[in-house]
Amino acid sequence: MEHITLNHFLFVSISLFLLGLIAIIIRKNAIMVLMGVELILNSANINFVAFSRFSGNLINGHVYTLVVIVLAAAEAAIGLAIVLNLYRLNQNINVDEIDQLKN
Amino acid sequence: MNIYDLAFYVLAFITILSAVIVVFNRNLVYSAYSLLFTLLSISGLYVLLLADFIAIVQIVVYVGGILILLLFGIMLTQEQVKVPVKANVVYIALSMLSIGLIAAFLYKYLFTAGNINLPNLSGQQGTFISGKSTIKYIGNELLTNYVLYFELLGMVLLIALIGATTIARKENNR
Amino acid sequence: MDQLLINLSVATLFIPIIGFIIVLLFGKRFKKLFLFEVVLLGINLLLSIYIAIVKLAYYPMQKFVSEFTWIHFISTSKYVPSITFDLGVMLDNVTVIMLFVVNLISFLVHLFSIEYMHGDKRYSRYFAYLGLFTFSMLGIVLTHNLLMIYIFWELVGVSSYLLIGFWFEKWSAANASKKAMLMNRVGDTGLLLGILILFTNYGTFTFDKIFQQIAAGNLPFGSYAWLTAAGILIFMGAVGKSAQFPLHLWLPDAMEGPTPVSALIHAATMVAAGVYLVARVFVMLTADALLFIAVIGAITSFIAATIAFTQNDIKKVLAYSTVSQLGYMIMALGVGAYSYAFFHLVTHAFFKACMFLGSGSVIHAMHHEQDMREMGGLKDKMPITFWTFIIATLAISGVPFTSGFLSKDGILLATLAFGKLTGHWLIPIIAYSVAGMTAFYMFRLIYLVFFGEPRNHHKYEHAHESPIVMTLPLIILSTLSVFWWYSLNPIDPSNGVFLEKVKTPNSIVPDVQRFQFMIQDKAKEVVNNITHSELYMETLHHFHYTALAMSLILAGLGILLATYIYKWRKIDVDALAEKIKPLYLFSLNKWYLDEFVQIVFVNSALKFSKALAWFDLNVVDGIVNGSAFVLRQISALGGLIDKYIVDGAVNLTAEIIGVFGKGFSKIQTGKVQSYVLYAVFSIILLFFIVKFF
């Protein structure tokens, strides 16, 4: 336990964050984008918990994490509903094709 | 090297590996399943961080709820005709550049920061005794200091419920 | 009392102009309004008689002056003096006599015109114009300064223009009035120059002030030459107005106007204005100026007399006779016989007006026939006209017991003395020959018109004596042509009533510039109130009987010759005319002076104005049009610049912005992923900014 410092957890967190960012930016499928979002949220959660643990075993980080998890759930639901609509519209869920607000 | 460190390294490795597979795999379903493993190993990391309740909630909500939802979504939105997607080189280059830059400075700060010593704030915010579970304390906080967030979360879930059904509803005879 | 007289004279000045305005405005509507004008003139006459009697009887030696400032230019710079224009009235013996003469003849002409102009379509306007003329003439007479004289001088010219061209539908009448106006203007230019020389040097227009300054030794521009020049230039005005030698051509043509107008303006009053002006400035004329004046007067009288021999129109004969007599008056002024000149002016006014009105009566009776060759034997048909005309003709011929004899004899005597004392003998020779010629052609007129067999029987049948309105003026005027009113002595007027009141004034020119004979002994002057030198008075006395005899002889010869030719028909005139054809034609065609003026002055002026018109049309207009053309091209160029460059700049800016806009709008891809990328980029950017700044 003493050899695993906050930095290690932060490394994980950063990696997950970057990977999630890559997923959002690069992937063409809408579901993949949502997965990227989940990854990022998770990285944020790890951050919260790690910091609360290393700030003297506080409980506040856990509460925030709970909030984030609930919000992630709500957001995933709505996001999928939107994706379903999108599928109905285009018969595919390629995010490159939803550029109605272009220019 | 004690078990804790080993557990951490293993779990961290699985997390990152799974996340890489999630991001870079062409197959959507493979990505979804990889996401499962990611979430599970994150849950393991929570345990290592003495966040027992959060670990469980992670599994129940994330894996059992959100991932299932995503799988349903994948199932319902399969492409009938595969259209070859043209890769926008400029876009990819720019994104690589930007990601690279962010990665650069984030990692740099991490590695040059040394051991981060955070102040011990346990006296002000309430502590928990190791060995006992955190659920009692979370419940306590939620209903006393963070009751507003608790209520709002209920609101949000309600709205998400209504919103999702409304958006995803089939439109007959409007 | 003097204020009363001044006020009355100003009243006489303004009464006619009121008549003018009222008759002009309302004459068309109220047909009898002309009688109002006549009545006004009658009032004027009575006032002038009153003024003349009071002044001459009770204040013969005084001069009443009243003036007021008309314009005062205040100068704010020390280089330019303040200028004051004064207007004023002066009552002198000469003034009140002229007042009486002008008003009397004007009134008689008004009376005469009631019948003469009857039925004319502009009847009322004629009377209005007569009122305007009377006003202008009285203005000249009453004034005490040169500015006012000039103003009224021009007004008289205008009235003359209006009245000569009264029947302007006739081309010859319109032309004659234009000619009169233009020739007058030529003279007036000289008058203006003279006035300005005096004004520049003395700063005032008033006669008395100018004369005071000259008497004090203040010569214009410091030299006698300028004084002589001023005098001669002012005389130029008289040359124009009184029809002296180069500018006399308008007077015969002015006979196109109605005969009463000729009587009023061109016999008695307006033409006398020139003589009056010279009389007013007499005291400042140097010897050279006086000589010039005398010579011009002599030449004029000679030329006019020779032309009058052959004229066939009764009015033309009278016109040339007027020119000749005016020459006499001017000549008299030139030789220094101021009082005789003025005397002749008054007597001439009466008998010439009488003759003109008499001829008007004849013309009216003969239904506007003016050629004497159509007349004849009218003495039985028109007795009153005949007898009054005879009396007037005797006066002009210088037959004793008439007023004309007294004045003419005085002039001839003065010229003789002048010739003796200065050696200029030509002047008395011309004067005497003209006297003989005058008698001749006037009696020729009498014989042709009133005696012999009527040559046009048709007109003769219809001729009858004119009504009383027309003959009354004739009677009055002929009565005034006898000697009795002017001097109790029919031969020598010097001690008579008239000459007592009108004395030759003292010249103010320095002695060196005067005729020696005129410079009187200062000691004797005050005592005897004579203004000529003793030598002069002796010479006059010496020549008195000679002059008398010579004038009687010449008058008698003239009358005899006329009777010989025209009454007794002893010489055939036409054959005589054939023999001396060139001379005859020369006289008949007025010495060809009109043609000379036409060719030399008028045609060259017309050619010059044609050249100027060509210049104006082609060069000036060409420049204007050319510049307009250039301007149009420039503005077209400007339009092009505006369209392509200016608008182009604006459009270019818009284009650039559009291009930028389009370029930037490519950022808005509509894809969520690119927006996320932008967000990421922005974070990096912010981070760098925060870290390094």
Image (cartoon, rainbow, N blue to C red):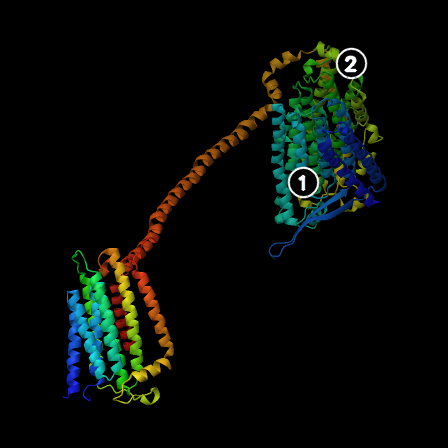
How crowded is the residue under tag 2: few (<14 C-alpha within 10 Å), some, or many (20+)? some
Q: Is residue A86 left or right of residue C639?
A: left
In which image quadrant can residue B149 be found?
A: bottom left
Q: Earlier in the sequence, mark 2 or mark 1?
A: 1
Q: Chain of mark 2?
A: C
Residue at 21% of width from left, 83% of height from top? Answer: B48
Q: Chain of mark 1?
A: C
Q: Is residue A53 above or below residue C375?
A: below
Tally of numbered tags: 2
Nearest the eye: C616 or B107: B107
Nearest the eye: B115 or C654: B115
Q: Amino acid at mark 2?
A: Lys
Same chain for mark 2 and mark 1? The answer is: yes
Secondary structure, mark 2, is: loop
> Residue C352: x and y, percent?
74, 26
Residue that numbered label 1 is attached to: C151
> Residue C306: x and y, percent?
65, 23
Q: From the image, which quarter does the C terminus of chain C lie in? A: bottom left
> Residue B153: x and y, percent?
34, 73
Q: Amino acid at mark 1?
A: Ile
> Residue C297: x and y, percent?
66, 32
Residue that numbered label 2 is attached to: C381
Residue at 35% of width from left, 48% of height from top? Answer: C641
Q: Is residue C328 left or right of residue C680?
A: right
